[in-house]
Amino acid sequence: MGLTRRQFTLSTLATTAFTMTGLGLSQGPALAATNTAYLMTYFTESPNQSAANYGLHLAVSRDGLNWSPLNQNNPVVTPTAGQLGLRDPYIYRKQDGTFVVVATDLKGLNFGLTSQYLHVWDSVDLSSFTGYRRIQMHTYGSSVHTWAPTVFWDASRGQYGIVYSANTTTDLFLVNYTSDFRTVGPPQTYFSPGFPILDADIRVSGGVTYMYYKNLANGNIYGARSNTGAPNSFTTYTSGLRQGTAIEGSHLVPRNDGGGWWLWGDSFGPINNDMYMWTTNNVGANSWSVLNQRDYTPPINSKHGSVVGITEAEYNAAVNRWGLPNWVRLKSSNLPDYYVRHSNNAVRIDPYPFDPHQDQLWRMVPGLADSAAVSFESVNRPGYFIRHSGYVAQLGVNDGSATFRADATFYRTAGLADSAWTSLRSYNFPDRYLRHAGQVLRIDPLSSSSSANDRQDATFRLTS
């Protein structure tokens, strides 16, 4: 339409029919537009907590699978009240087409600290987050937490439900209803199935309310559903789901193209800093399939994310305001949880996460020996580049010599194992490609007739 969200008055927003292509969600009146991308909110942690940050982080994705952090993976806003930090931020598109973010009032890993409040922000087009406030969800004692909120529109009530994890008589879900995310009704028990539960996520589709949650008794994620979305009306309909050693933070995402649904799960704790995914063509069936980690790349160090479909105008507003990363990561094709990093001047692949996490960040610059090629400069050791010496890759300081420039220059080619990915051919040994062998990177002679394993070893995704 050529207009940004700012150019519409609130009265226009309130009266314009809104269609979210492929979602089948009950969204109500809002701006008529098609979602072409996705936005994720999250906080960050890493194994030794050097990357821990409990402000609101954003990332964008065109395909819903591979993500680019905004603002160089720094927070766009940070709470200024309560415990001065957030966890579990949840972004939701309201009936008027604008956004609200609700988040747990908790900073760090001291889960013994509890709060009766949630953090809240508003956003019109994702270029700013304003109206910061906290809303009190209950008046239970200081031992009762208010964790991991999710939001849904209850059409029968004409109100939003805010569902969150609490521990009153047991670990269960409470709900408060609101019209404005400023005042809320009294808490009600929303779901208490007879065993302890955590981390609800709720979507309404085709007149059915779907809720995914963690069963604390066995550590698995399950899906439940209700024809009304009313408190205490849900029936569990899926088998237990789990990837990794421990999982929580389930998040249900309808695809913009209408081709199905994704389910995200978050590994527990900063040491296990992975996000996992499943996919299905039918959210109402017990038919989730595990997605290979090769097929998706969460934002670096991200924890307990939430995802919303966004329009082209909203994508551009967010990117123009906050900026895309000025670095890349190199993800292994055949070991997709491994990334290229430097360690003691060696260049190798290691499983993510690790600290310092900056060891895997590279500035991809015009090739030192040929500007049509590329070179990779370390972000946390400026002036040091990936180069080969004796065919083995290492991190070396640019001494300005012709030999160094040649050793540090690579041509990007279609991936030898997957043309949608990338292989890196040596500038001065044009029959050799950068590949991993025993986790160490080196350059070896390779071609399309090389073994499948060798071609996989030389194939990477350049991602952020």
Image (spheres, rainbow, N blue to C red):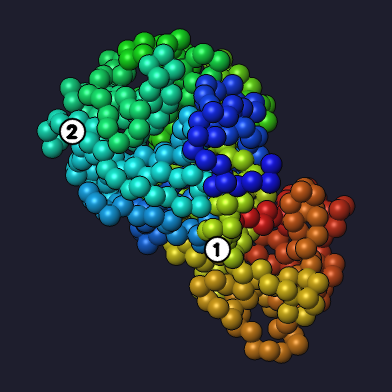
Q: Which is more toward the observer, 192 or 25?
A: 25
- Name the image quarter holding residue 23: top right
Q: CA distance from mark 2 to mark 1?
A: 40 Å
- In the image, taking residue 209 as reference, residue 291 lies left or right, namely right
**Residue type at numbered disc 1:** Gln
Mark 2 residue crowding within 10 angstroms, few (<14) / some (14–19) / many (20+): many
Callout 2 amino acid: Val
**Which is more toward the observer, 41 or 262?**
41
Q: Which residue is mark 2?
A: 144
The label on residue 360 is 1
Please provide percent x and percent y for residue 10: 49, 38
The structure residue drawn at horizontal position 69% and vertical position 67%, both measured from the top left corner, is: 442
Above or below residue 132? Residue 53 is below
Residue 214 visible within the image: no
- Nearest the camera: 242 or 390? 242
* N-terminal label among 2 and 1: 2
SS for callout 2: loop
Classify 327 as above or below 220. Answer: below
User: Going 55% across and 52% down the picture, which residue do you hit?
Assistant: 318
In the image, residue 253 lies at what x, y percent? 54, 31
Q: Quadrant of the C terminus?
A: bottom right
Q: Position of residue 50 (x, y in %)?
A: 37, 62
